[in-house]
């Protein structure tokens, strides 16, 4: 597996490997760390240069491909031992490779690094006390020293691997945190888009329903009552202008998340009643009891939008000129609302999957209440209750 590196990281690793090679090869060719002292003979010198080169390349590859670096380090160690060379400066590269296997390697390389740390400690101990570098005969007096060397080598190699594992864990935790933040941001954005879509549907659907009803009325009354046609056109104009202003605010909110969308409240209900009555609907509003105080803004918005959509459904699917009953009951802890209208013969009844019904249900549930909409004895009735107190 090869990991993509930034240009600076690649240049740094190449420079480190080259510098390590030149320092280590000079040290190896001049230090008496083998049984025979400094290397002599062409083959021995080439062998020393060879394992130094393997360790240097492994050091340069440690981040680009930890698995390849681990294999090169093992090849360099085997060549070093075959030339009867003892531990020296060049073996420092092993610590960097073990660190990289834990920090950057795949799962297999990660555990291969752990196995290499334990195996490497055992191999170096056996090589020093059972191999050709051992100058004393093997007896019980050597055993304590061998155990100490084994423990020290295991600690050193495991320390490098453990540091890499800690870095790996910290990086994974940071990646998980960033992924969670991105998911939360996407969820917030999706919720905001859904809210704006509901507002857009409520504004456009209600306004167009009023405009269509007024336009039909004006067309029929144009010849008999010109003044009624003029009043209908004025209602169409004012309704369309208000809808256009709301749509512009919603589109601004889509472009700029900090923009404020239309936030209707209880004070806007009188205008809503007037629009519906102007469309020729016999609207009967009963508010008993009235709000005991100033309800929370979220409750006011939810009540307004549910009533707006319910009245829009009445304009679309209700019996022409038929009565529409609206009941609002404000209590200390909840508000109950009911909108009922007779269904016109042959007209379709809003279903549970209609956008308007879905929007009303979502608004009610988000406010912590309950919602129902169904046909009851020839009338389509919308019922909802919303808690006035914010739930804990």
Image: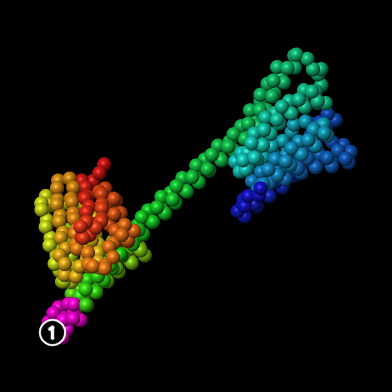
Give coordinates of residue 349: x percent, y percent.
27, 63
Q: Is residue 321 left or right of residue 8?
A: left
Which SS class for mark 1? loop
Graded by Cα atoms within 10 Å as few (under 14), some (14 to 19) or many (20 or more), the crowding at tag 1 reads: few
Q: Residue at x 79, y 17 (%)?
A: 138
- Would you say residue 123 is visible in this rendering? yes
**Relative to residue 373, is residue 149 depicted above or below?**
above
- Would you say residue 367 is visible in this rendering? no
**Relative to residue 168, is residue 182 depicted above or below?**
below
Q: Which residue is drawn at 22% across and 77% down?
A: 215
Task: Give the residue at mark 1.
Answer: 224
Between 377 and 183, the residue placed more toward the observer is 377
Toward which corner of the image does residue 265 lie, by quadrant?
bottom left
Q: Does the magenta stretch include residue 314?
A: no
Between 305 and 376, the residue placed more toward the observer is 376
The magenta segment is: 217-232
Q: Is residue 227 magenta?
A: yes
Q: Is residue 115 left or right of residue 205?
A: right
Q: Residue at x 49, y 45 (%)?
A: 176
Give coordinates of residue 389: x percent, y percent.
20, 46
């Amino acid at each position: 597996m090869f990991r993509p590196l930034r240009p600076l990281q690649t240049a740094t690793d190449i420079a480190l490997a080259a510098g390590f090679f030149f320092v280590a090869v000079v040290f190896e060719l001049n230090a008496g760390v083998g049984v025979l002292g400094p290397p002599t003979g062409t083959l021995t010198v080439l062998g020393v240069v060879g394992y130094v080169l393997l360790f240097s390349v492994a050091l340069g590859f440690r981040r680009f491909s930890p698995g390849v670096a681990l294999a090169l380090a093992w090849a360099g160690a085997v060549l070093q031992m075959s030339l009867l060379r003892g531990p020296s400066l060049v073996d420092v590269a092993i610590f960097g490779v073990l660190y990289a296997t834990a920090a950057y390697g795949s799962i297999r390389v990660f555990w291969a690094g752990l196995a290499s740390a334990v195996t490497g400690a055992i191999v170096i101990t056996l090589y020093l006390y059972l191999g050709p570098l051992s100058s004393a005969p093997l007896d019980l007096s050597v055993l304590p020293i061998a155990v100490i060397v084994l423990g020290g080598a295991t600690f050193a190699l495991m320390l490098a691997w453990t540091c890499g594992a800690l870095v790996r864990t910290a990086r994974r935790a940071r990646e998980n945190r960033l992924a969670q933040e991105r998911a939360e941001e996407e969820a917030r954005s999706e919720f905001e888009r859904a809210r704006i879509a509901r507002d857009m549907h409520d504004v456009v659907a209600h306004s167009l329903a009023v405009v269509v009803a007024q336009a039909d009325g004006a067309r029929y009354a144009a010849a008999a009552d010109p003044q009624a046609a003029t009043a209908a056109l004025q209602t169409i104009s004012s309704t369309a202008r208000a809808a256009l202003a709301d749509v512009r605010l919603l589109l601004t909110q889509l472009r700029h998340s900090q923009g404020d969308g239309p936030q209707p409240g209880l004070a806007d209900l009188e205008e809503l009643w007037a629009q519906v009555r102007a469309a020729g609907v016999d609207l009967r509003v009963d508010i008993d009891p009235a709000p005991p105080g100033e309800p929370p803004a979220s409750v006011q918005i939810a009540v307004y939008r549910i009533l707006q959509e319910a009245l829009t459904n009445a304009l679309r699917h209700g019996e022409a000129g038929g009565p529409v009953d609206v009941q609002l009951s404000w209590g200390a802890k909840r508000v109950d609302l009911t909108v009922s209208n007779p269904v016109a013969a042959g007209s379709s009844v809003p279903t549970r999957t209609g956008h308007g019904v879905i929007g009303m249900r979502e608004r009610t549930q988000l406010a912590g209440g309950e919602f129902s909409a169904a046909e009851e004895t020839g009338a389509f009735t919308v019922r909802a209750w919303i808690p006035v107190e914010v739930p804990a």
